[in-house]
Image (tube, grey):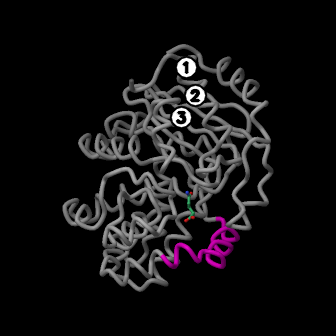
Amino acid sequence: MNDLQPLLDEIAEAVKPEFGKGKVADYIPALARVPADRFGMAVCGIDGREWRTGDALMPFSIQSISKVFTLLTALETIHPDELWQRVGREPSGTPFNSLMQLENEGGIPRNPFINAGALVVTDAIAAHSASPVPHLLNMVRRLSGNPGIVIDEEVARSEAEHGHRNAAIAHFLKAQGNLKSEVTRVLHLYFRQCAIAMSAMDLARAFLPLANEGVIPATGEQRFPPLRVKRVNSILLTCGLYDGVGNFAFRVGIPAKSGVGGGIVGVIPGKFSVCVWSPELDNLGNSHVGTAALELFTRKTGLSIF
Ligand code: GLN
């Protein structure tokens, strides 16, 4: 791989006209306080090289990106068959916080990356752990090599105060028998996992094993089995950006996960992980500038999974 620094700096410049076209999430009031014009990008190669530009070291709210870490945790906590009876693996084609499809389909969420599916995954972990959030923090700290990663308590509180849609989803799941713990416990855990703050560099590092058949390149540790990595990457490709996933595959062409904090992190298997952060979202809740940056990145490098 060439030195990517000139390309990252070029992308940071090229996306500037895109600012002002999206909107920072405000349904979680604490997120609306983040300056809209932030932009950071980080790339980690499986050969150990790293590049970054802009605000790549600034922590932001990872929000739905946490759903990847909880899925990985659930898959090493309970038998996969047990999990896949409670949540599907199909793209939803509906907004991440939709209730309609969940009711039509009897309380079995389409996939683990929409809110309903993530609540089921969190519930599955909660049944086997007295302290799921410290466990999760431990995982992301280790994967990213940053022991300083913490939860943004203000964001967690803010979402708890305004998370009525998620409460409705959780209650419906409970009514359908697809939530084992108490609704309040699952919501509490879910809001806290979403409020973990990480930088683009932290996230790119944390996703690197997904680009490397489960092996952490720096240590050689086989952190996840290759089959699990293949499967999680396939769900990222088909479900990682909700009802924007087809357009994202068309424009960017990599398995990735977005969050309403403005982060998008993805992998090109066998090559690298890449994370962008820019808080303005498109109308589906994915980073507008971040998508533009990733599109330029895969076009200019000629690398995608297709
Ligand atoms: N915490 C957010 C929510 O549940 C996460 C959504 C997202 O990032 N897409 O609404």
Q: Is residue 79 above or below residue 257?
A: below
- The span from disc 1 to disc 2 (Cα, nearest Å) is 6 Å
Query: Is the residue marked by circle 2 packed among few (<14), some (14-19), or many (20+) residues within 10 Å?
Result: many
Quadrant of residue 13 in the image? Answer: top right
Q: Is residue 10 left or right of residue 117?
A: right
- SS at circle 1: helix
Viewer-side residue, 184 vs 59: 184
Q: Is residue 231 magenta?
A: no
Q: Quadrant of ligand 1?
A: bottom right
Task: Tell me residue 244's x, y (percent).
Answer: 51, 44
Q: Residue at position x 36%, y 41% from top? A: 233
Quadrant of residue 16 in the image? Answer: top right
- SS at circle 3: strand
Of the two numbered discs 3 and 1 on the same chain, state the one appearing first in sequence: 3
Question: Foreground mark, 2 or 3?
Answer: 2
Q: Which residue is mark 1?
A: 299
Q: Main secondary structure of the magenta part?
A: helix
Query: Is the residue marked by circle 3 packed among few (<14), some (14-19), or many (20+) residues within 10 Å?
Result: many
- The span from disc 2 to disc 3 (Cα, nearest Å) is 12 Å
- The span from disc 3 to disc 1 (Cα, nearest Å) is 14 Å
Q: Which residue is mark 3?
A: 274
Q: Which residue is mark 2?
A: 295
Give the magenta part as a residue range: 152-168
Of the two numbered discs 2 and 3 on the same chain, state the one appearing first in sequence: 3
Q: Is residue 162 magenta?
A: yes
Q: Residue at position x 36%, y 84% from top? A: 175
